[in-house]
Image (spheres, rainbow, N blue to C red):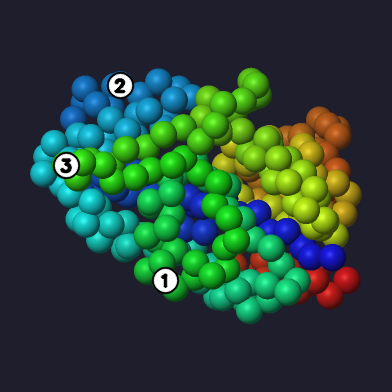
Amino acid sequence: MKTLVVFDFDHTLVDDNSDTWVVRCAPEQSLPAWLKASYEKGHWTEYMGRVLSYLRDQSVYPDAIRSVLETIPFTDGMVELLTFISQNKRNIDCIIVSDSNTLFIDWILEVRGVKSAVDSVFTNPASIENGGYIGVQCFHSHQCENCPVNLCKQKVLSDFRESQASSGVHYQAVCYIGDGGNDFCPIKVLKETDLVMPRKGYTLEKLLSKARHENKALKPQIAPWSSGSEIQQQLLDLIQQ
């Protein structure tokens, strides 16, 4: 059976946040106070829709946005890791679950030539509309009270595994790689045979440490990482089992 690798995107595959990186396109590389003040907790996607509309109103077109996004740095070792995954598709399925959007992720993966590593991307749909506006929509609705209104990563992971199982695809292990608070929810459905890899020094590692300290029932093994090479070694161990 294959191993399923699940990546977060911002601050995991790439070493920054694609949604905030895009602000470099704005006049003087900053947003006006009224726009920043419009953000409501848990409603980041709607806020980003307003940011993208503002950029177009400032005559910043999609090609310019793409050019800026293509300069975002990948985290150390991640390009090599994705290349390794693309060379081992017989043993590895790979998905991205992210609160970014489809256009940003597609552009960034494409410029580094690593799209072939990724089988599916679950993120907010985005498209270029009439007049050069980029529209972004919420990925789905859900009942989870712990996640942003537009994306519960636990639901995405559970739905994906259920869909795969109905097609006869079962995984010997899941390797979940992330950094943020919204990566904690899907870890609750992982098993003893699964592996969670939090980025060292980031929120997810701290949440996992706190949960273990409080004796909360988390089943997967935990292996913190700081570079893609560490993840690659863990994957080698998994697929050789």
Residue 131 image label: 3
- Residue 54 rendering spot, x and y as whole percentages: 20, 34
Q: Residue at x 63, y 79 (%)?
A: 87
Disc marking residue 194? none
Q: CA distance from mark 3 to mark 1?
A: 28 Å
Q: Is residue 103 left or right of residue 26?
A: right
Between 33 and 126, the one lying in front of the other is 126
Q: Quadrant of the C terminus?
A: bottom right
Up the image or down, 180 lies above or below 75; here it is: above
Residue at the image point whose x is 23% and y is 51% from the top:
62
In the image, which is nearer the foreground, mark 2 or mark 1? 1
Give the side of residue 85 with respect to residue 23, left or right.
right
Looking at the image, residue 178 lies above or below residue 134: below
Disc 3 crowd, CA 10 A, few/some/many (<14, 14-19, 20+) = few
Residue 42 to residue 100: above or below: above
| Helix, strand or loop for disc 2 | loop
Earlier in the chain: of badge 3 and badge 1, it is 1
Q: Position of residue 79 (x, y in %)?
A: 51, 71
Looking at numbered disc 2 in the image, what kind of residue is underneath it?
A: Ser
- Asked if residue 48 lies left or right of residue 89, the reply is left
User: Disc 1 on helix, strand or loop?
Assistant: loop
Q: Which mark is residue 112?
A: 1
Which residue shows up at 73% across the image and 35% down it?
210
The N terminus lies in which quarter of the figure?
bottom right
Q: Is residue 225 left or right of residue 44?
A: right
Residue at figure coordinates x 77%, y 37% from the top left: 188
Q: CA distance from mark 2 to mark 1?
A: 34 Å
Q: Secondary structure at mark 3?
A: helix
Can residue 158 be seen?
A: yes
The numbered disc on residue 38 is 2
Q: Label 1 sits on what residue type? A: Arg
